[in-house]
Image (cartoon, rainbow, N blue to C red):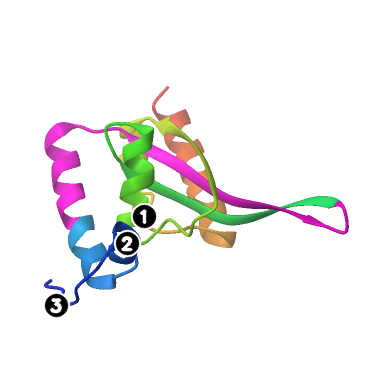
Amino acid sequence: MICYSRHDSFEEAGHCPDHAARYREVVEGMARRCGDPYFWLSFVDRIVDDDQPVVLHHGVAVVPAPDFSTAVDTAWLTGCNPGGEVRGYELDRGEVDRAQVPLFTLLDGVDLEAAKEALAAAHEEGR
């Protein structure tokens, strides 16, 4: 896929569907060859509403990367990082593969619950 748009910044490139699709292909291929781990990234915004703290959960993305910082950048460049505060942790590569969790996709609601259940089942299966 070729993008004919000119992007002035890293942030703009991260929101271009053509760049995101191409970057996903490249990262997936590299991760398979290098054996990079997967990272579970959770995105939230913390706001104060009427002096009450409120956490808005945007969703979760699973991405392959050699480390957490690169995982956050990869999520941005592949279009599955909506912004906000990010927390995450490394997942077992075999469990993610067995669970067939969608990569580079912002998961929420039913899809997020399905991913959690699939990972839990893959974890039990691997014991």
Per the image, label 3 sits on a secondary structure element best described as loop
Residue that label 2 marks: 14
- The residue stretch that appears in magenta: 25-51
Check contact, mark 1 vs mark 2: CB within 8 A.
yes
Estimate the x, y position of residue 30 in percent, counting from the top left: 14, 42
Q: Is residue 70 left or right of residue 83?
A: left
Image point 39% across, 38% down: which residue?
39
Estimate the x, y position of residue 62 in percent, counting from the top left: 39, 46
Residue that label 1 marks: 76
Per the image, label 2 sits on a secondary structure element best described as helix
Q: Residues within 10 Å of mark 3 (few under 14, many from 20)?
A: few
Mark 3–mark 1 distance (CA, rounded to whole Å): 19 Å
Q: Quadrant of residue 9?
A: bottom left
Q: Amino acid at mark 1?
A: Trp
Q: Residues within 10 Å of mark 2 (few under 14, many from 20)?
A: many
Image point 15% across, 33% down: which residue?
34
Residue that label 3 marks: 4
Mark 2–mark 3 distance (CA, rounded to whole Å): 14 Å
Q: Amino acid at mark 3?
A: Tyr
Estimate the x, y position of residue 82 in percent, counting from the top left: 48, 60
Image point 20% across, 48% down: which residue?
27
> Considering only order in the chain, which callout, 3 or 2, is on the residue closer to the N terminus?
3
Q: Residues within 10 Å of mark 1 (few under 14, many from 20)?
A: many
Image point 59% across, 61% down: which residue?
109
Does residue 38 belong to the magenta stretch?
yes
